Image: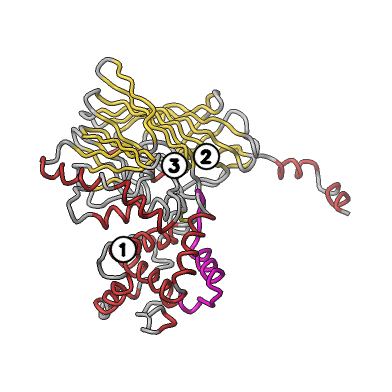
Amino acid sequence: MLALVLSAVPAQAREAADAPTAGAAGLGDPYFPLDGNGGIDVLHYDVRDAYDFRSGRLSGRTTLTVRATQDLSRFNLDFLLQVSQVKVDGAKASFDRRNRHELRITPAVPVLAGSTVTVTVRYSGKPDDATYLGEGNWLADAREVVTINEPHMAPWWFPANDHPRDKASMDVRITVPKERKVISNGTLVGRVVKGQVATTHWRSVEPMAPYLAFFAAGSFEVRKDSADGRRSVVAVSKRLAPRLRRASMTMLRETPQLTAWLETQLGPYPFATTGGLVTSLNPGFALENQTRPVYPVLGPGSGRLLVHELAHQWFGNSVSVDRWRDIWLNEGFATFMEARWTESTGGPTADEWLSDSYDALADNTAFWQLRIADPGRDRIFDSAVYLRGAMAVQALRNRIGEDAFWTTLRTWVTSRAGGNGTVEDFRALAASVSGQDLAAFFDAWLVGTTRPARTAANGF
């Protein structure tokens, strides 16, 4: 019957149906529809950039190893700088831009589903002039640059499939004046000095979401350590006052010990290296760049901040959000691990913290109105996502008990390592592990717009 139906379809119509088509301009994230791109899966980035501190100009060449997930006549990359040339498998490809964020590439011949091609993009421009959705994310002055931000950063310095759903390994080579040092994710491969400039090469073998990739260039004090077979690289800007530099370095060098403590709670650390960097540029936040978080100035009381960003190596980096609305899975759990660390080091218990926070925020109506499971694009980093989100995690711990709780967390980060997850996925896992009906519990904490009642069913 199928053969008869097909034979009745005109040949031209069948050919049209089979013809390669353009990949979508986005992956369909409800909050950021143009983030990522349809029809492609990036396997590897080879980023080679040079940065001029005096002019603020960045120029470079990035080669992406891309697997087609459909027959492609055209595909997009997310990028904000001016492009001079694109090649696909060594052949020149045409390109255009319907808007500044979307680089549309038309290869000389279609790319067939399942095939792997290299895409090389040459570009230059001033990243500080670039904006996307009102974000101007370039952080630099005449002596230091650090490429950190969330949820977007990659398109300011390399063309990417910019969504956490598409992770890839990376090689990053940055060329700057030889008196500057360059720090990035992963492992240092080498540094080559040629005349007045030096090119530093870092490699990340574990797949990484594009926004977690970074480089910092400037005058840094760098310390390298090795504990339990794991390498740690930490760096502090030499532009900081000596007292601040010493304090920041002292805290950063606790990174291996804090990583080891997190392993006792969550299971094996998901990456080969760890570390961190303190910048003098005062970004106003810390960010969990994969293997090497970036911080503002640190002091003796910064342990909780380090724990938060290091916990993200499990919650957010190894297991990433499937959609940006799932941000609770990153921030709620990293904030909970702060409370757990305080509990483990002789401070108030996480349950005491939950109770105290619940009482202190009793009259904060706006805090309780935010739907944690879907906070909206403009509120993904609202304080309630962090605090109420962490309170929900501790309440879950109370509700299902220690064994089921820690089994749930460890199963989550192990079973989805290197992948993604949704809030719905986590809810289903917690219910499965505990054997409890948790629908009303999660609705009260993550969906409801009022303060959850202080009941045993809600984890009190």
User: From this viewpoint, is residue 446 visible?
Assistant: no
Main SS, magenta residues: helix
Q: What residue type is disc 2 on?
A: Val
Q: What residue type is disc 3 on?
A: Asp
Q: What residue type is disc 1 on?
A: Ser
* In magenta segment, residue 262: no
**Numbered circle sitting on residue 42:** 2
Specify the segment rendered in magenta.
Answer: 418-443
Look at the image and tell me in which quarter the N terminus lies.
bottom right
Question: Which element is circle 3 on?
Answer: strand
Residue at the spot 37% in from the left edge and 80% down from the top edge = 460
**Numbered circle sitting on residue 344:** 1
Whole-percent x, y for residue 288 in the image: 34, 49
Residue 141, quarter of the rendered image: top left
Residue at the spot 48% in from the left edge and 42% down from the top edge = 207
Q: Give the labeled residue for mark 3.
A: 78
User: What's the image's color scheme?
Assistant: secondary structure
Q: Residues within 10 Å of mark 3 (few under 14, many from 20)?
A: many
Q: CA distance from mark 1 to mark 2?
A: 41 Å
Q: Is residue 303 above or below residue 93?
A: below
Pair 1/3: label in front: 1
Q: Is residue 2 left or right of residue 389?
A: right
